[in-house]
Image (spheres, rainbow, N blue to C red):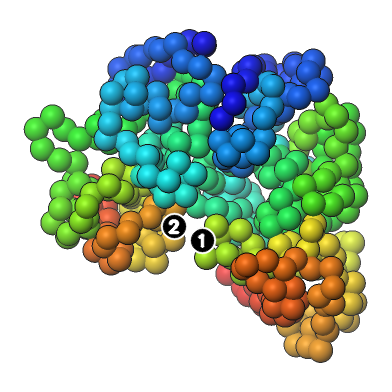
Amino acid sequence: MVNVSLTVNGKAVSAAVETRTLLVELIRNELKLTGTHVGCDTAQCGACTIHLNGKAVKSCNLLAVQAQGAQVVTIEGVTPIDGLHPMQTAFRDHHGLQCGFCTPGMVMSAIDLARRHGSPSEEQVRAELDGNLCRCTGYHNIVKAVRAGAAAMKG
Amino acid sequence: MYAFNYHRATSTADAAAKLGANSDAKLLAGGQTLLAAMKLRLANPSDLVDLAGIADLAGIRKEGNALVIGAMTRHAEVAESADVRASLPALARLAGGIGDRMVRNMGTLGGSIANNDPAADYPAAVVGLGATVHTNRRKIDGDAFFTGMYGTALDAGEIVTAVAFPLAKRAGYAKFPNPASRYALVGVFVSEGAGGVRVAVTGAGSCVFRVSAMEKALATQFTAASLSGITVASDELNSDMHASAEYRAHLIGVMAGRAVTDALTAR
């Protein structure tokens, strides 16, 4: 077992984990932050997307020990206690989800791309969401939601 | 995933010592291929030596007539680097087309070429630009680095530290991605530089290779039209559920033409 210390959603946390523990396992099983989902466990679907030092990464394809000393933000960390992040509101308003399983990863990717692109084009949103799979919506409403959410984030 | 011992290296020398201490130890760069292989128990290292803490392995700098990119530089950093975009835009586009955004935020240049997946993008750029691979022991000519499927010229305990990409007069890359994995069914990198014209193909065979007939034609006239009629034999090419060898041979011609067009397109 090794000791891992990192900051998750602004709070310093530390846990004793096996070296083979994945970051998503630390987040879900140890820290009980179950908003981050495991869809495929093969780094393809993007449901486990979180922000590692400000960048979107797949937490099922990362060891917990790789996040030693890092700043991690999960879907819980972007959601205000009473209400929703503008990107979450946009997903709701534009019917950007159906079953909702992929949504936490979609929102984390969307926030990252909105921060970098400001007002992303439809083409940019589709290219950037390459690593997030949704089996319900057919993506059109997700793209609309991301563009609206990006606009709302700019205020 | 089987259990393993984890080490965080503080320098390249430290990493080499830790790697040399056990013959079943492996280096951990971005982990985007290795960790997936370990989850499937296709890889079973006794020890992982993490390179992420070695600051001087990451970064992009211009050195004379070359861009020197550190082995731990992430794909997203290469894709977005103002230096790469200005002096080798085809390399920035290639890096921006690897995997997906989240994979590009972790995956590294050194990890990609050391693994030498037959369908990886970076080997096409290393050979297609005539780059030089720097290790902790020596400099290896890009043409001699990739030795076969998942094979490289690296010795046991040798660590890629950087790749020096010579600047080209023009360069282009085109790939036909597998729609699910985004790996190249066929990817072709072309360049015209001080060393002449180069055409490097990834995804089609067991390892990246050059097409001399295309290089000769492009040296005479660097246009997509000058490739017409040049075919690549399918005998040695990959054939699988995604594409037959004949289809891949056909795609080499199509992607080479698109790569030339990419190189000639002013942006």
Q: Which quadrant of the view contains residue A96?
A: bottom left
Q: How many marks?
A: 2
Residue at image location 31% in from the left, 49% down from the top:
A102
Task: Using the image as rendered, state which of residue B132 and residue A33 is in the foreground.
Answer: A33
Disc 2 element? helix
Mark linked to residue A130: 2
Do marks 2 and 1 share a chain? Answer: no
> In the rendered view of the protein, which quadrant contains the C terminus of chain B?
bottom right
Q: Is residue B123 left or right of residue A2?
A: right
- Is residue B37 visible to us here? yes
* Closer to the camera in the image, B183 or B83: B183
Quadrant in which the N terminus of chain B appears: top right
Picture quadrant of residue B159: top right
> Which amino acid is tagged 1?
Ala
Residue most extreme to the left = A82
Chain under disc 2: A
Where is residue A21? Give x, y as percent.
Answer: 48, 24
Lateral position of residue B49 relative to residue B207, left or right? left
Mark number, residue B180: 1
Percent coordinates x, y for residue B234 in the rendering: 81, 75
The reply to whether callout 2 and callout 1 are in contact (CB within 8 Å) is no
